[in-house]
Amino acid sequence: MLVGSLGSSVGLMSVLLGIAVYIVETLTRPKRLQSALDLYTFSPFELGLPAEEVTFAPLHGDHLVSGWYIPASGATATIIVCPGYRGQRSDVLGMSTMLWRAGYNVLAFEYYGHGTVVGKPVTLGYREIHDFLGAVAYAKERAPETRLGAVGYSMGASVAIMGCARTPDIEVLVADSPFATHESAVAYAVQRTLHLPFILFHWLTDCILWLRAGYHFHQVEPIRDIVRISPRPLLLIQGLQDTIVNPHDAHRLYEAAGEPKELWLLPDVDHCGAYFADRQRYVTRVISFLDRTLRASQQTEQSDQHLSEAS
């Protein structure tokens, strides 16, 4: 009986270990090599945008990050646009176009290994934050006289939260469908696919993540960093039918954030689906938020400066 019990325990541990390895491998494995059909995406050419193909260095790392830089005549602000996990810069081309038409310079980039550069292992924000901070440095270099804002989606939104906590250069952030913690994102996926509580695999998965990717869950926690964005304005956007990120994460992030902050919840919208649910409404709200927080504050500063000079 003791032997049988021991055998059952070993068997159970083997199953849990196998699931933990599968979770980490699925999370970090290199994106498959692209076929010709995968490369047939829209580009700035189809939309008549004066975009430049650019590359820039991350804050740390020996790779180069790919992006499009779209200059707008007379722009006083530059918006960095960040796609999500395994996303390409072409995924955010629609919003990037609207921002450019509104008079903003735009830097749309893709996280290394997630987009058109494939065959490289990825993480869920741990290494990608260096790409974001590299984008900030590049945007400052290209237009040092402009103010900076950021619009991020999914993992890109979570990385932007952590990045903004580490640099004061981003003055306004729009975060669409971010996860609160690395662990919450993985747990939600496990619960939805395996229909099992993640607590069964948490410790083993965290250990495998450290062995395979060099970091732990607790090292990627936007909810811990978000308070450091204040007093810079923050807009959180979340669909309540999200199948990728737990919608409750938006409430957690909003509660943890300082003022000024806004939370836009959409009842019947899936992951990063607010734009597609009503493009006009989405574009109007996001650009109005950016105009109000970036441009209006700049006009106020200029008015104060003029009054000071006149007196």
Image (cartoon, helix red, strand yellow):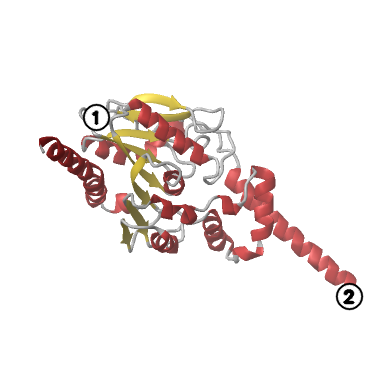
**Residue 291 picture location, percent across and down:** 22, 44
Residue found farthest to the left: 310
Which structural element holds mark 2?
loop
The image quadrant of residue 81 is: top left
For badge 2, the amino acid type reads Met
Crowding at mark 2 (Cα within 10 Å: few <14, some 14-19, many 20+)? few
Rendered position, 217 above or below 35: below
* Image marks 1 and 2: residues in contact by CB distance under 8 Å: no
**Residue 6 picture location, percent across and down:** 85, 68
Query: Does the image show residue 178?
Result: no
Residue at image position (18%, 44%) is 300
Residue at image position (56%, 31%) is 61
Crowding at mark 1 (Cα within 10 Å: few <14, some 14-19, many 20+)? many
Task: Indicate the quadrant containing the C terminus: top left, top right, bottom left or bottom right.
Answer: top left
**Residue 64 picture location, percent across and down:** 50, 27
**Residue 267 picture location, percent across and down:** 33, 64
Q: Nearer the viewer, mark 1 or mark 2?
A: 1
Foreground of the two, 186 or 75: 75
The residue wearing badge 2 is 1
The residue wearing badge 1 is 72
The image quadrant of residue 89 is: top left
Which structural element holds mark 1?
loop
Foreground of the two, 24 or 211: 211
Rendered position, 27 above or below 238: above
For badge 1, the amino acid type reads Ala
In the displayed structure, does residue 62 sit left or right of residue 71? right
Dot placed on the residue nearer the N-terminal end, 1 or 2: 2
Q: Disc 1 to disc 2, how far (Cα)? A: 76 Å
Residue found farthest to the bottom: 1
Task: Indicate the quadrant containing the N terminus: top left, top right, bottom left or bottom right.
Answer: bottom right
Rendered position, 155 above or below 102: below
